Image: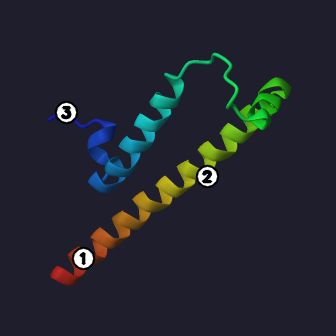
């Protein structure tokens, strides 16, 4: 079996990452036609270009949480192996 980066991820991390990716793709697929129920704050942030800063901060936070969960899962797996021996 070919060793690719997905096989190196723990299954729990992959299970957390998959819904996140699906949500991101779902939000990209939405139409951009204006509607009366759209929040004005998002329009203002988009017009001033600050929406990209908000998206970047959210991506950094989610990436950090995912990295922490993967690292924690590896530590717990290692401890489980030590206790099992």
The residue pinned by badge 1 equals 80
The mark nearer the N terminus, 1 or 3, is 3
Locate residue 7: give its quadrant: top left
CA gap, disc 1 and disc 2: 28 Å
Asked if the residues shown at circle 1 and circle 2 are in contact, with their CB atoms under 8 angstroms apart, the answer is: no
Q: Name the front one of labels 1 and 2.
A: 2
Q: Name the front one of labels 3 and 2.
A: 2
The residue pinned by badge 2 equals 61
Asked if the residues shown at circle 1 and circle 3 are in contact, with their CB atoms under 8 angstroms apart, the answer is: no
Q: How many marks?
A: 3
Question: Which disc is residue 24 wearing?
Answer: none
Residue 67 picture location, percent across and down: 49, 55
The mark nearer the N terminus, 1 or 2, is 2
Badge 2: residue crowd in 10 Å (few <14, some 14–19, many ≥20): few
- Residue, far top: 33
Residue drawn at x 46%, y 30% is 26
Q: Quadrant of the C terminus?
A: bottom left
Q: Could you tell me which secondary element the residue under label 2 belongs to?
A: helix
Q: Quadrant of the N terminus?
A: top left
Q: Is residue 6 left or right of residue 21?
A: left
- Residue, far front: 36
Q: Is residue 6 above or below residue 10?
A: above
Q: Name the front one of labels 1 and 3.
A: 1
Residue 49 picture location, percent across and down: 81, 27
Decide which of 31, 56 is in the foreground and name it: 31
Q: Is residue 45 left or right of residue 80?
A: right
CA gap, disc 3 and disc 2: 31 Å
Residue drawn at x 83%, y 31% is 44
Locate residue 59: give its quadrant: top right
Question: Which disc is residue 2 wearing?
Answer: 3
Decide which of 83, 63 is in the foreground and name it: 63
Badge 3: residue crowd in 10 Å (few <14, some 14–19, many ≥20): few
């Amino acid at each position: 079996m070919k060793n690719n980066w997905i096989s190196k991820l723990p299954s729990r991390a992959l299970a957390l990452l998959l819904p996140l990716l699906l949500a991101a793709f779902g939000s990209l697929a939405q139409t951009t036609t204006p509607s009366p129920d759209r929040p004005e704050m998002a329009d203002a942030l988009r017009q001033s270009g600050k929406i990209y800063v908000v998206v970047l901060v959210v991506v950094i936070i989610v990436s950090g949480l995912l990295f922490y969960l993967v690292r924690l899962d590896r530590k717990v797996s290692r401890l489980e192996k030590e206790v099992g021996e």
